Amino acid sequence: MDKKAIDRRWLPLNALRAFEGVAKHGSFTAAANALLISQSALSRHVIALERLTGVLLFERRPHALTLTKAGQHLLPAVVKSFDRLEYALDDIRNEGAPAQRTLRVQMPPSFAVQLAVPILQDFRRASTEVDIDLISPYGVGPPLGDVDIAVVYSKPTVTDLVTDLLWAVRQSILCHPNIAAAHRGKDLAAFIEANELIHVRIADAPRHHFWTEFTRQNGLAGIDVERGMVFDTAVLAAQYALGGQGIAVLDTNLFAAEIRAGKLVKPFDAILDDGYGYYLTTQPEGLADTAISLFRSWLIGRFGSGAAAPAAAVQLAVSNE
């Protein structure tokens, strides 16, 4: 069956603006007030767009208005398209003068706190015309739909995005040096059983995922891993460990500065490799955007050369403190 294509000459720009406004404000009334048009005119625009696409874009309930799956698919494309039109028109109006551009950048909380935030000022000094709007949602998987570029913690997936592997995560046991010293001479199984476990919660996985996988991969049967504190992020888990309590399975790249300073130690060489990595993702059309291209190249230069790159970046952050 042949797919129907919409002729660019008949793109309903006013209807798309109305759709974006309703999605943004979650209300026909609020969107109409923001766009300075009547609510009836706004409704007609949205209905016309739904007729054009052949699907509902909003679920209309008495006291709630939510995007349908089709609406969720359309909204990021509309927002980005209008943003880029706005940037291009600003460039023309300013007669080539550098226009200030804001990039919406997504990063996992622990990656942002440990590696990116301490050195973002380096990028700002090199690219003064680009501002960063950093968001750090909890979880794993694909980026949010309204970001320009994202670092995601994920397993390898096939998507339409341009994807660069920054590094494959290899996790090890990390703890306070006093704990390692107090249990020196014990084998791995005895060390784990003798200490409080620190867990990092991961979306769509059991509460004790990392410790369960660590003991399984290292052939440690019969160890109770369903005990101890559970934290939402690796940074929180590391902070607890830095206080001298418990042992955690963590990415040594993220906490290279603490390891180098002797604040955390890795008492065993055993690792966990469960397929996760940090990936840089960009929409294909974003590669032609100068600001996105600059930030993408900067991130790859800092973090995209294997395990040594994150450690080097952290060392820079530490030396600047």
Image (cartoon, grey):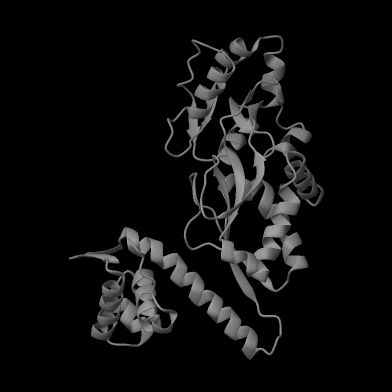
Q: Nearer the viewer, residue 195 or 30?
A: 30
- Provide residue 67's location: percent of width, then percent of height: 32, 63
Q: Residue furthest left?
A: 62
Q: How many marks?
A: 0
In the figure, 155 relative to 177: above or below? Answer: below
Q: Nearer the viewer, residue 286 or 272?
A: 286
Give the residue displayed 59% in from the left and 17% down from the top: 218
- Provide residue 214's location: percent of width, then percent of height: 56, 22
Q: Left or right: where does residue 148 sit relative to residue 180?
A: left
Give the image quarter of residue 39: bottom left
Q: Residue furthest front?
A: 1
Q: Quadrant of the N terminus?
A: bottom left
In the figure, 29 relative to 150: above or below? Answer: below
- Provide residue 181's location: percent of width, then percent of height: 72, 17
Q: Left or right: where does residue 122 sit relative to residue 174?
A: right
Give the residue displayed 54% in from the left and 80% down from the top: 85
Give the image quarter of residue 244: top right
In the figure, 319 relative to 272: above or below? Answer: below
Give the image quarter of residue 126: bottom right
Residue 273 seen: yes
Residue 104 seen: no
- Provide residue 118's location: percent of width, then percent of height: 71, 53
Give the residue displayed 63% in from the left and 13% down from the top: 188
